[in-house]
């Protein structure tokens, strides 16, 4: 085990004492895996980026990808701070590419990101119809709604809480898609479905902010209750109601009885901001 020896020698009565601290040894953290461009032609090489953090230091970071049913191919990634970049070469029209990021740290521990995929020549998806639709601090759930006519994959879609540097939830390929006119509910610490499981901290008694982003990191909408300069600080209790777009999918944010997984009411009451 790798160690740092900290000499905190206390000189008193001719005695000395030294404290030995063990550094945490564990896997690297891989976040914000994404590729560009989003609309891919047969002449495009694809740039994959990821944020990688490791206390021991990174020995290697690479992209592992396969085309259709082919074998895995490895591409090395280069670092600029905690941002790592690699390139998947151009592929034939119609090819389906599945990839993940693999990291080995100096402790010899290997970490793999969830798989992501793209299809060469596929029409770009319009995520403008994906809506942050309800936030329920009582059942600890956030509802997304697809008001469009085309199913939207949740892979790479993210929710950011209180301007956090990492996501409260990020969809993966295993999160599936949201059907036209359909709803997806992401629940805090959702043991029944880890792919629709968010972090902690949805509260009806706090200054609160959530932002929905598409797989390219483009904002799809923001909910803010209270004072953004005092996020997480306590304010008035809005239970048992939840924050909802009224009318469903298009309206302003209001207070109304919870409708997780179903259409919101046409009207609600104003949300107290203090």
Image (spheres, grey):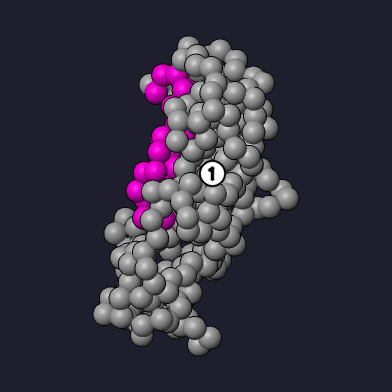
Question: Would you say residue 1 sits in the magenta stretch?
Answer: no
The answer to whether one can see residue 262 in this image is yes
SS class, disc 1 = strand
Residue at the right extreme of this rendering:
192
Q: Residue at x 37, y 68 (%)?
A: 123
Residues in magenta? Answer: 207-228
Vertical side of 88 occupied by 14: above or below: above
Q: Residue at x 64, y 41 (%)?
A: 261
Q: Residue at x 52, y 67 (%)?
A: 115
- Classify the position of the N terminus by image quarter: bottom right
Say which residue label 1 marks. Answer: 144
Residue at the bottom extreme of this rendering:
70
Vertical side of 65 occupied by 124: above or below: above
Question: Would you say residue 223 sits in the magenta stretch?
Answer: yes
Indicate the position of residue 231 as horizontal and vertical percent values: 45, 24
Dividing the picture into quadrants, the one containing residue 84 is: bottom left
Dividing the picture into quadrants, the one containing residue 82 is: bottom left
The answer to whether one can see residue 53 in this image is no
Indicate the position of residue 122 as horizontal and vertical percent values: 39, 72
Whether residue 217 sits left or right of residue 112 in the image: it is: left
Indicate the position of residue 229 as horizontal and vertical percent values: 38, 21
Q: Residue at x 61, y 44 (%)?
A: 185
Indicate the position of residue 213 as horizontal and vertical percent values: 41, 46
Q: For this rendering, which residue is in front, 206 or 252?
A: 252
Vertical side of 26 occupied by 88: above or below: below
């Amino acid at each position: 085990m790798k160690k740092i020896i900290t000499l905190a020698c206390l000189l008193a009565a001719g005695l000395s004492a030294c404290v030995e601290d063990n550094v945490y040894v564990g896997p690297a953290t891989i976040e914000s895996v994404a590729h560009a461009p989003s609309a891919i032609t047969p002449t495009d090489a694809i740039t994959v980026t990821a944020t990688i953090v490791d206390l021991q230091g990174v020995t290697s970071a690479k992209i592992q990808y396969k085309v259709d049913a082919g074998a895995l191919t490895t591409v090395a990634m280069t670092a600029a701070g905690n941002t790592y970049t690699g390139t998947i070469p151009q592929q034939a029209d119609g090819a389906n590419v599945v990839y993940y990021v693999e990291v080995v740290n100096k402790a010899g521990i290997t970490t793999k990101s969830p798989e992501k995929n793209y299809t060469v020549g596929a029409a770009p998806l319009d995520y403008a119809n994906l809506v942050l639709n309800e936030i329920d601090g009582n059942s600890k759930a956030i509802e997304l709604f697809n008001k469009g006519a085309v199913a939207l994959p949740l892979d790479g879609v993210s929710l950011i809480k209180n301007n956090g540097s990492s996501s409260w939830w990020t969809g993966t390929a295993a999160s599936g898609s949201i059907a036209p006119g359909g709803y997806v509910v992401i629940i805090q610490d959702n043991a029944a479905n880890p792919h629709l499981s968010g972090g902690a901290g949805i509260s009806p008694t706090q200054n609160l902010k959530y932002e929905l982003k598409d797989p390219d990191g483009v904002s799809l909408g923001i909910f803010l209750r209270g004072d953004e300069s005092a996020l997480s600080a306590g304010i008035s209790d809005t239970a048992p109601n939840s924050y909802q777009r009224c009318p469903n999918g298009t309206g302003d944010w209001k207070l109304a009885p919870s409708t997780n997984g179903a259409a919101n009411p046409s009207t609600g009451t104003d949300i107290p901001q203090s």
